[in-house]
Amino acid sequence: MPIAIYPGTFDPVHYGHIDIATRAARIFERLIVAVYDRPLKNLLFSPQERVALMSEAMTDLPNVRVMGYSGLTVNFARQQAAQVIVRGLRVTYDFELEYQMALTNKKLAPDLETVCLVTSLEYAFLSSSIVKEVALAGGCIQAMAPPHVIVAIQEKLKKGARDSEAAQTRLTSRDWPT
């Protein structure tokens, strides 16, 4: 049975990611959840934090390993002896991006296949951006992410608020020249 990788940013991991990983783990002998370290996105968590959060979310899946990586996904897949790249699809917009990415990966690595799994209906609305946006606005994300992820998000937001308050205090307490 082939080895598969499920690459992504996972910032933060949510139930949609877990749904895809769980289903892929049933299909493939071994699944590597590959956490990309430097996406062109605004990140809430460091690569190490994202690996740790995803690892905790995958503890019930014995054939899943979570690893961080950098560089091209196809190169990481080859390093891990994977034959398949797993991707999740939510909406039509995802299909267009995933189709383009699959064709690019096929050009770079003709020996790798891409398998897309359609997200379960209950998670079709979820994205990491939505989870962060709702959390930043003070909304409830209990139905979106596991409890350990919610705690980590709350801690990040509190730290960010403290850092912001400290910066504001420094700016307003300066002796400005008159």
Image: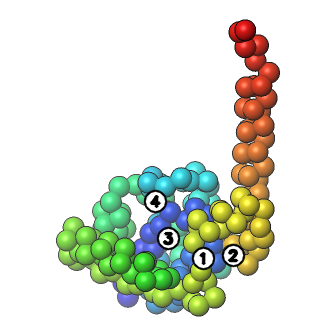
Name the mark nearer the viewer: 1 or 3: 1
In the picture of the structure, the residue carrying the numbered disc 3 is 33
Q: How far apart are the alpha carbons under marks 2 and 4? A: 21 Å
Question: Quadrant of the rendered structure where residue 143 is?
Answer: bottom right
Q: Which element is circle 3 on? A: strand
Q: Give the residue drawn at x 53%, y 80%.
A: 21
Q: Which element is circle 2 on? A: loop
Name the mark nearer the viewer: 2 or 4: 2
Pinpoint residue 55: horizontal percent, then vertical percent: 61, 67
In the picture of the structure, the residue carrying the numbered disc 1 is 126
Q: Which element is circle 1 on? A: loop
Q: How is the image coloured?
A: rainbow
Give the residue furthest to the top: 178
Amino acid type indicated by mark 2: Met
Q: Give the residue drawn at x 58%, y 61%.
A: 11
In the picture of the structure, the residue carrying the numbered disc 2 is 144
Give the residue furthest to the front: 178
Crowd tier of the residue under label 3, counting other residues whose Cα lies within 10 Å: few below 14, some 14–19, many 20 or above: many
Pinpoint residue 27: horizontal percent, then vertical percent: 46, 90
Q: Give the residue drawn at x 45%, y 56%.
A: 39
Find out whether the residues at labels 1 and 4 contact each other: C-beta distance under 8 Å: no
In the figure, is residue 69 to the left or right of 10?
Answer: left
Pinpoint residue 32: horizontal percent, then vertical percent: 47, 72
Q: How far apart are the alpha carbons under marks 1 and 2? A: 7 Å
Mark positioned earlier in the residue sequence (2 or 4): 4
Crowd tier of the residue under label 2, counting other residues whose Cα lies within 10 Å: few below 14, some 14–19, many 20 or above: many
User: Residue 36 — which label?
Assistant: 4
